[in-house]
Image (cartoon, rainbow, N blue to C red):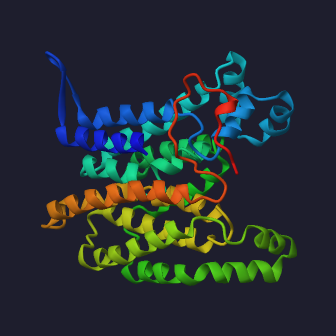
Amino acid sequence: MLIYTCFILLIYTLLKLGKIKIVKGVKIYGFSAVFILIFLFCALRFDVGYDYSMYYELIDGNINYYTDQINRIEFLPRQLIIFSRFIGFYQFFFIISSFVICYFFYRAIKENSEDKWISTLIFICFPLFFFMSLSLVRQYMAIAILFYSFSFIKQRKFWRYLAVVSLCFFIHKSSILALPIYFLYGNFFNKKLIVFIYVLGFFSSEMVAFIIQSTSETYSIYFDQIKGEGGNLILIFFQILGLFLLPLVYNYRDKKDKNFNFYLLSYFVGLFLWASLSKFGHAGIRGGLYYMSFTILLIPHLKNKIKEYKIIKELMAIICIIFFFLNLYIGSKHKIKDANLPYQTYFFKSVKDFKSNE
């Protein structure tokens, strides 16, 4: 816990400092320094994240496990695993994947956020983003690239966006769910529709479950096996946040502000998708991530819309810090193992140093 405390305090300090003088004539922005720190934190980790041990076993484990499992991995990360195994350096996979995630989130926030300070804190502290990227490594590489490709959505360059989705499909198959995001941008913004989507989300999971159980015996059995999994506490948090965002739909709607309309619509569509599939293990949360990622840009976009934004910003910072430690607390209560604690670096570590699953 001490390492995480120092980590978030250092990030907060760097963001507050703004420009940092390295040597005479050389300065670095605190925002850039923060993402360098995040990259190092992720790239050098050992046994942090639920899937870390799986990738370790694929790269540095026995040949039988490798042969059985390697073809389940999508093409591009499979090549990265094969190369890491070839050079005999398992951490190479985490260094490259961490770079992809951090670089594209950094660029997306830098180019699109109205307040990089708050966007960065939301990325690090909110459930779904930084902590989840430590576990859903392949999917988060795809999410980061697609999040950065928002520029193609704004510029209405469909074929370029389609090319990015196609590329990401070879990183994680769920990327195909990001294709409809392109069509959310523009003038398609109806207040009643958003409220309807939000309310329906509270009942949609039961309806979807009922339909599947009634029509497919095979999927009904699968449903029974995974019932109850999938991060319901996090879903409830984002549903509560959605309730606070609803007034924005009515009070700050601006047909000319296509970005703001898009962020709001993406949030509520993602929330609906997540809620609808919440009874199917992690399918819901994985599907909603591509849409919910725009929360990182949504809240800072209020900067030019609300007079009291400075107060909201400070309050948001406090909430973010609370959520950072809440994430760690919830992870510590996991019935199998704590994915995040303790934080370890890969230096001088071996298979004997993995955390127990008991």
Q: Please name the residue shown 34% across and 44% down the image.
A: 8
Residue 54 in which image quadrant: top right
Let me know if residue 164 appears in the view.
no
263 to 209, vertically: above or below: above
Nearest the eye: 304 or 255: 304
Q: Please name the residue shown 34% across and 66% down the image.
A: 261
Q: Is residue 288 left or right of residue 350?
A: left
Q: Please name the residue shown 27% across and 47% down the image.
A: 116
Nearest the eye: 8 or 120: 8
Nearest the eye: 154 or 346: 346
Q: Is residue 207 left or right of residue 313?
A: right
**Where residue 4 sits in the image (x, y, percent)?**
40, 43
90 to 226, vertically: above or below: above
Let me know if residue 35 appears in the view.
yes
**Where residue 217 sits in the image (x, y, percent)?**
87, 76
287 to 252, vertically: above or below: above
**Where residue 181 sits in the image (x, y, percent)?**
50, 59
Q: Is residue 81 left or right of residue 23?
A: right
